[in-house]
Image: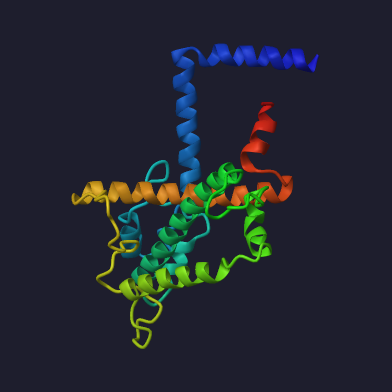
């Protein structure tokens, strides 16, 4: 009986959404719900000073469906309470961009290495590294390969370059802040010349990078959690769920 009622409901729903009028009603309802959520997660103008709020709204990454800034944790209010709120915002933005870029590489790397692990490549020349990606590092170390040391050294070099380029001198009063002439995330590395010179187009591309990085941070966290729970590779688990 329940299955029959569910089938009737699905058929009725399909007929409802097939009409233009119903689509418009549903679309308006969706916009209203998003607007209601946006109001709840926006910064409180009574807590955040106008100059800080306007500066934050003008930064890349603010876009629909949250044009008034998505800030459910009230981080903007915390930044506004610091002695130098603008510098604090820029420091957090630098952190967000960096974590987003690492997450984009990590989420792609998770999928790629799981698909290529059956082939004899430079990181798996003996074909003995297998299974979910969360266990690959341990398997490399168990084979006696020198891996962690070069990796940590490479990370240290990248971080040293980033700190030297954009961060204030530790001995100055601006310790733990970015330089005034440094744009968060702009390391001067653009070999393909993808960053536009037009300010509007430049901001649009930076927003796209931020949104992709935000999605990647959620994705890599989900990948790790899924493999810890299921003990299976990403696509193996997905195909099982889809019955393929």
* Residue 43 shows up from this direction: no
Point out residue 26 in the picture as x, y percentages from the top left corner: 49, 24
Q: In which quarter of the image is residue 160?
A: bottom left
In the image: residue 146, left or right of residue 164: right
The colour scheme used to paint the residues is rainbow
Where does the image place residue 105, in percent across and percent down from the top left? 47, 52
Horizontal and vertical percent position of residue 111: 55, 44
Q: Which of 42 and 158 is in front in this view?
A: 158
Quadrant of the image containing the N terminus? top right
Residue at position x 28%, y 51% in the image:
203
Query: Residue sitting at 41 percent across and 72 percent down?
Result: 157
- Picture quadrant of residue 15: top right
- Residue shown at 21% from the left, 51% from the top: 199
Q: In this view, does 239 lie above or below 195?
A: above
Instruction: Name above or below for residue 237 compared with residue 244.
Output: below
Up the image or down, 93 lies above or below 217; here it is below
Residue in view at x 45 percent, y 51 percent: 213
The furthest residue to the right: 1
User: In this view of the protein, which residue sits in the foreground, 207 or 232?
Assistant: 232
Residue 161, given in percent of the width and then of the height, sits at: 36, 72
Whether residue 198 is visible to the viewer of this picture, yes or no, is yes
- Give the total of numbered labels: 0
In the image as oriented, which residue stretches furthest toward the left?
A: 198
Asked where in the image residue 63 lies, by quadrant, the reply is top left
* Image quadrant containing the C terminus: top right
């Amino acid at each position: 009986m329940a299955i029959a009622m569910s089938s009737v409901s699905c058929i009725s729903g399909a007929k409802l959404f097939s009409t233009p009028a119903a689509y418009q009603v549903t679309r308006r309802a969706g916009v209203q719900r998003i607007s209601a959520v946006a109001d709840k997660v926006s910064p409180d103008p009574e807590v955040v000073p106008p100059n800080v709020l306007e500066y934050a709204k003008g930064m890349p990454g603010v876009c629909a469906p949250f044009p008034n800034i998505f800030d459910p944790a009230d981080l903007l209010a915390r930044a506004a309470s610091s002695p130098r709120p603008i510098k604090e915002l820029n420091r957090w933005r630098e952190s967000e961009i960096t974590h987003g870029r690492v997450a984009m590489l990590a989420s792609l790397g998770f999928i790629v290495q799981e698909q290529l692990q059956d082939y004899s490549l430079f990181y798996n020349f003996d074909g003995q590294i297998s299974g979910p990606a969360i266990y690959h590092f341990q398997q490399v170390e168990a084979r006696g390969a020198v891996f962690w040391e070069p990796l940590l050294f490479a990370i240290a070099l990248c971080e040293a370059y980033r700190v030297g380029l954009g961060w204030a001198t530790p001995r100055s009063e601006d310790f733990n802040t970015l330089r005034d002439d440094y744009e968060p995330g702009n390391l001067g590395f653009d070999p393909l010349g993808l960053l536009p010179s037009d300010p509007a187009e430049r901001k649009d591309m930076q927003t796209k990078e931020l949104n992709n990085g935000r999605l990647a941070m959620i994705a890599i966290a989900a990948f790790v959690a899924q493999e810890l729970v299921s003990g299976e590779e990403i696509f193996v688990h997905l195909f099982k769920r889809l019955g393929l």
